[in-house]
Structure formats: structure tokens, C-alpha cells
Amino acid sequence: MTISEKSAYLKGLMDGLSLNTETDEGKMIAAIVDLLGDMAKRITDIEETTIAISDELDEIEEDLDAIEDYILDEEEDFDDEEDFSDEWDEDEDFEEGFDFGDEETTIYEVECACGEIINFGEDVLEQGSMICPNCGETLEFSTEDDE
């Protein structure tokens, strides 16, 4: 028996017993039966909504799987065309920071405590400190080697 059927059964029992709804006990029983009927309707609505959402999620999952398959196929095609693993010489020494080909344009990167990532050049490094543009905290730098 479903919740709606049980609620309807209780309402039928109340009507069949010919309870006097003018007494305090009769009013309370009638209110409880009405409440159970309303709750049964809400639960049924929630169940139907849940089923509809579940169906939609299944469709979305199928679409995402199709997109993933498409992307993986594209990556495999790309990997087959060119192999970039020879471009990087693992024995090559890299300086700290990013080098854009000109020794004077080395860019350094620091992350502030607030999460802001800040890029700066040699001139700021030589100054030894800078102020975070996001939170205003002073960031200090040292060019000395720590041993």
C-alpha cells in the first residue's frame, strides 16, 4: 500500500466510524487525518520530482560521456600527428622565474597569502619588497642563498 492509499484508508475509517468532529477528540483525529493526507500528497510530488531529476541527470551523464569520448578521440588524433616530447631537453638548466628569451625580461611570480598571484621583474626583486595590489600586504624578497 502506498502512503496515499494508507492516508485514504484512514480517512475512510474515520468517516466509517462516524466520529463526532464536534468533540475535542474528534477534532484532533480529523486534523491528524487531514495532515496525513496533505503529507501524502507532498511526498508523492517529491517522489515524482526526484524521478524526473534522476532522468534528466541520466541524460546529462550520457551527453557528458559522448563529449568525453569526442575529446579523447581528438587528443589521440593530435598525439598521432606530432610528438612534442623531444622539444624539452631534460638536462638543460633553467633559471628561477620565466625567461622570455631576453636576459633582461625575466619575470618572477609569487603568490600572496590572500591567493593573488603576482608577476614582477628584476627591478622589484632588487627593491626587496612590494605591496600586494589585492590585499595591500607587503611582500618581502631576498636574493641571498639560504643554506
Image (spheres, rainbow, N blue to C red):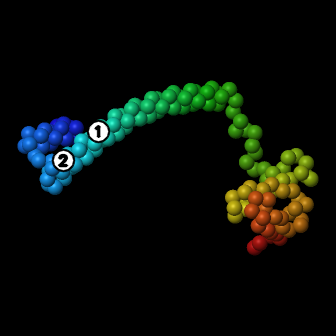
In the rendered image, the vertical position of residue 47 relative to residue 121, given as above or below: above
Where is residue 7? Give x, y as percent. 19, 41
Question: Could you tell whether 65 is left or right of 13 in the image?
Answer: right
Q: Which residue is mark 1?
A: 41
Q: Is residue 143 visible?
A: no
Q: Which residue is mark 2?
A: 30
Residue found at the very far front of the displayed protein? 22
Where is residue 23? Give x, y as percent. 14, 53
Q: Please tell me which residue lies in front, 14 or 40.
A: 14
Question: Could you tell whether 24 is left or right of 52 in the image?
Answer: left
Q: Quadrant of residue 109?
A: bottom right
Q: Are marks 2 and 1 in contact (CB under 8 Å)?
A: no
Q: Is residue 88 visible?
A: yes
Where is residue 80? Give x, y as percent. 64, 27
Q: Please tell me which residue lies in front, 69 or 112.
A: 112
Label 2: state its secondary structure.
Answer: helix
Question: Could you tell whether 1 is left or right of 106 in the image?
Answer: left
Where is residue 79? Give x, y as percent. 64, 30
Identify residue type, mark 1.
Lys
Q: Earlier in the sequence, mark 2 or mark 1?
A: 2
Q: Residue at x 89, y 51 (%)?
A: 105
Residue found at the very far left of the displayed protein? 17
Q: Please tell me which residue lies in front, 73 or 45.
A: 45
